[in-house]
Amino acid sequence: MQEETKKEKLPLKIRRANAADAEVLARIGWQSFDEAFADHPANHPDDMRVYMNEAFSVRAIESDLAEAKTVYLIAEIDGEAAGYAKIKFDSREDCIAGEKTIELCRLYALDKFIGKGVGKNLMLKFFELAAENHRETAWLGVWEFNYRAQEFYRKFGFEKCGEHVFQLGSDPQTDWVMQRKI
Ligand SMILES: CC(C)(COP(=O)(O)OP(=O)(O)OC[C@H]1O[C@@H](n2cnc3c(N)ncnc32)[C@H](O)[C@@H]1OP(=O)(O)O)[C@@H](O)C(=O)NCCC(=O)NCCS
């Protein structure tokens, strides 16, 4: 009985976002970024604000959603938005192998849903999209101090191949670039 409770799965659905999802994506984008990084001593609140006001504005998400090469996936648990992924086709950096690429630009679960399969299911859907679209290489950037996400990505086969700058407001931060074959 106890075992059954432990294994109980919340209904989790992954769906592709459309233009009507801009507001929900802006909201969970803002909240999940804040939950993940606001408390880190390396991040100045002013830099966080500058970055987040731009990156998670409804206007910015709407413009992403209108781009042919950008896809957002939304994870819903019991009908509630629990996390999302932003994906881009054909972007690449020097250390990325192959020409047919797919980038996992953002992968976030809201704090209260962390550890409930949101990240894994978004990642599996990302790999599905990659395979369907005959991609050779999947890649991503992850903050040098985001050890939890680095571990998570290693678990899914990504390996570090380089670094790039991630501009958080006035702060040029270092991201690891990680890739894996599809
Ligand atoms: C990184 C993140 C997306 C992972 O998503 P998640 O929903 O918490 O992970 P899941 O519940 O889907 O875990 C899936 C599997 O990975 C494992 N896992 C989760 N986090 C892990 C970690 N840090 N290291 C190793 N394994 C991990 C789980 O045990 C699970 O394994 P199982 O299927 O064998 O049981 C999530 O922690 C998150 O949103 N963090 C904050 C935002 C962030 O840092 N995003 C990345 C920015 S680059």
Image (cartoon, rainbow, N blue to C red):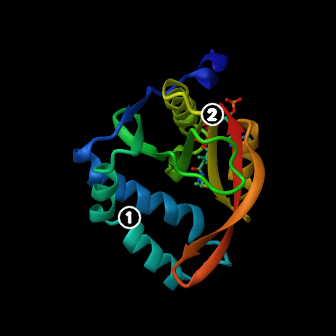
Quadrant, the N terminus? top right
**Where's residue 41, x and y in %?**
67, 78
The amino acid type found where label 2 is placed reads: Glu
Along the viewing direction, whichever of 151 and 2 lies nearer the viewer: 151
The answer to whether residue 114 is left or right of residue 133 is: right
The amino acid type found where label 1 is placed reads: Phe
Q: Which residue is mark 2?
A: 136
The answer to whether residue 109 is left or right of residue 59 is: right
Along the viewing direction, whichever of 92 and 61 lies nearer the viewer: 92
Q: At 22% across and 46% down in the image, what residue appears?
A: 20
Hey, which quadrant is residue 141 in on the image? bottom right
In the image, residue 105 sits, relative to residue 119, either above or below, namely below
Q: Secondary structure at mark 1?
A: loop
**Where's residue 80, x and y in %?**
36, 40
**Where's residue 142, x and y in %?**
66, 57
Q: Residues within 10 Å of mark 1 (few under 14, many from 20)?
A: many
Q: At 73% across and 51% down in the image, what residue appears?
A: 150
Query: In this view, which residue lies farthest toward the front?
Result: 99
**Where's residue 89, x and y in %?**
48, 44
Hey, which quadrant is residue 102 in on the image? top right
In the image, residue 12 sits, relative to residue 143, either above or below, namely above
Measure the C-alpha gap from mark 1 to mark 2.
Answer: 30 Å
Q: Which residue is mark 1?
A: 56
Hey, which quadrant is residue 75 in on the image? top left
View quadrant of ligand 1: top right
Query: In this view, which residue lies farthest toward the left?
Result: 20
Sequence-earlier tag: 1 or 2:
1
Q: Secondary structure at mark 2?
A: loop
Nearer the observer: mark 1 or 2; the answer is: 2
